[in-house]
Image (cartoon, grey):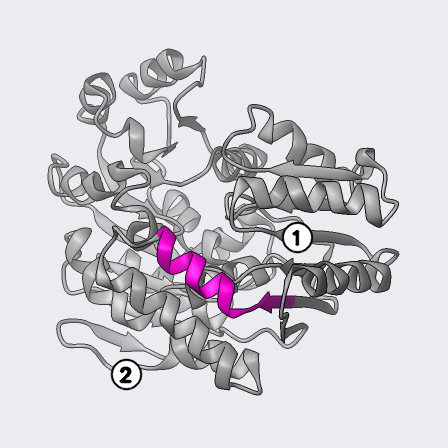
Amino acid sequence: MTNKQEKLICNTFGISKLKPFQKKVIKDLSDGRDVLALARTSEGKSICFLSMITLHPNGLLIGILPTVALMHDLVQRCEDNKIRTDCLYSGNRENTTVIERLAHGKLQALFVAPERLNDPHLWKAIQKNKVHTVVVDEVHCLTEWGSEFRPMYRNIGKFIKDLPNSSVVAAFSATVMPDDIPYIVKSLHMKNPVVHIGKLKRSNLSLKKTFVKNDAVRYAKVRKAIQKYDSKGKIVIYCTRVCDVEDMRDFLIEDCDISASEIALCHSRLSNRAKQEQRFRSDKAHIMIATSAFGMGVNIPDIRLIIVSQLPFSVAAFYQMAGRAGRDRKRAKALLLWNDADFQMNLDIISDTDDRAVEAVNELYAICESSDDLHEAVIGCFAKGGVRNGFSLWYPYD
């Protein structure tokens, strides 16, 4: 990447300069190298792939994204910078119009849900464009969701392999475990990729864990945490199941004297998830109770407290939840409440899945049992593993 190209990127997106992490990733992508880039939230991963649109204004970038909210955020960001873009997802009334725009070469970027990749009309329209970059954002979903839940994630690799012209593949996440890197590289048909591991630990974010012997103690800890942080900003409470979300809502209303209007909910059975999220984002509700479905890739900067009220299914899942706090770089906290019953429930839920899921549950449980410094233990899980065969590893950026 030349100085002129860097200046063009900075001018396009209104930033003063690129971070070292961004420079390395953009250089490799512009040199035609496939890239897997891992870094904490706020490191500017999206600039890394959006810059490819600036460097290839007459081609097409395809971004494969897990949530509609993330698509809309990126579309808005592109439109603010005069980049012609649109998105495709199930239930979007504009899908036909979007494909027509794509077929006539009127888009520089298309953000699409994995479930839409097998649409023959989309495929025909793509073939009329020169695709220079395929982005898989939040790529940890490939390992977490690629079996029973959202099985179309398993077909992303085939989509990439079948593209009519050679494209660079760029995959991004804040939480990919080292043991999952070879699987991701193989699944996405990445060719000798460079793996960039940026800064992972966030100095403004405090991670704490507390053992709760039963649900009465769990709820008491939730009440105490809310009372402490209620006046400091937004609060998110994560629960494992939909029924747990509803129970937590009832507890806040009946036992904590919190008005229902101050609470937003997010889980897979809600038909108005976007409306609930907007209530939370706009301060009409300052507490969000949700399953892990909430927040992926969405930037709500002023979340001060994350309460993970039950043991998640992996270290990566926990760090994704915790990472939603303090994106404005002000002090924030994530509190993990756990017990043996949570661990057993998770094992029961994943009993029909593969061994990797069981190993992930065991790993987080072991950390909770034995680690005094939760933050260091979590970061240690991402940092372990060293250089892998078959691709280059850059680690870390200080």
Residue 237 is labelled as 1
Residue 360 rendering spot, x and y as whole percentages: 35, 67
Whether residue 109 is visible here, answered yes or no, is no
At x 33%, y 43%, the residue is: 56
Which residue range is magenta in the image?
A: 335-349
Residue 130 rendering spot, x and y as whole percentages: 22, 34
Q: CA distance from mark 2 to mark 1?
A: 34 Å
At x 66%, y 43%, the residue is: 247
Which quadrant of the view contains residue 76?
top right
112 and 206: which is toward the camera = 206
Which quadrant of the view contains residue 250?
top right
Label 1: state its secondary structure.
Answer: strand
Label 2: state its secondary structure.
Answer: loop
Residue 49 rendering spot, x and y as whole percentages: 39, 51
At label 2, the amino acid type is Gly
Which quarter shows the N terminus?
Answer: bottom left
Specify the principal SS of the magenta part.
helix
Q: Is residue 307 magenta?
A: no
At x 39%, y 12%, the residue is: 97
Residue 189 rendering spot, x and y as whole percentages: 14, 52
Which label sits in the foreground, 2 or 1? Answer: 1
For the residue carrying disc 2, how many other residues have a C-alpha within 10 Å: few (<14), some (14-19), or many (20+)?
A: few
Q: Is residue 209 above or below residue 48?
A: below
The residue labelled by disc 2 is 386
Answer with mark 2 or mark 1, whichever residue precedes in sequence: 1
348 and 183: which is toward the camera = 348
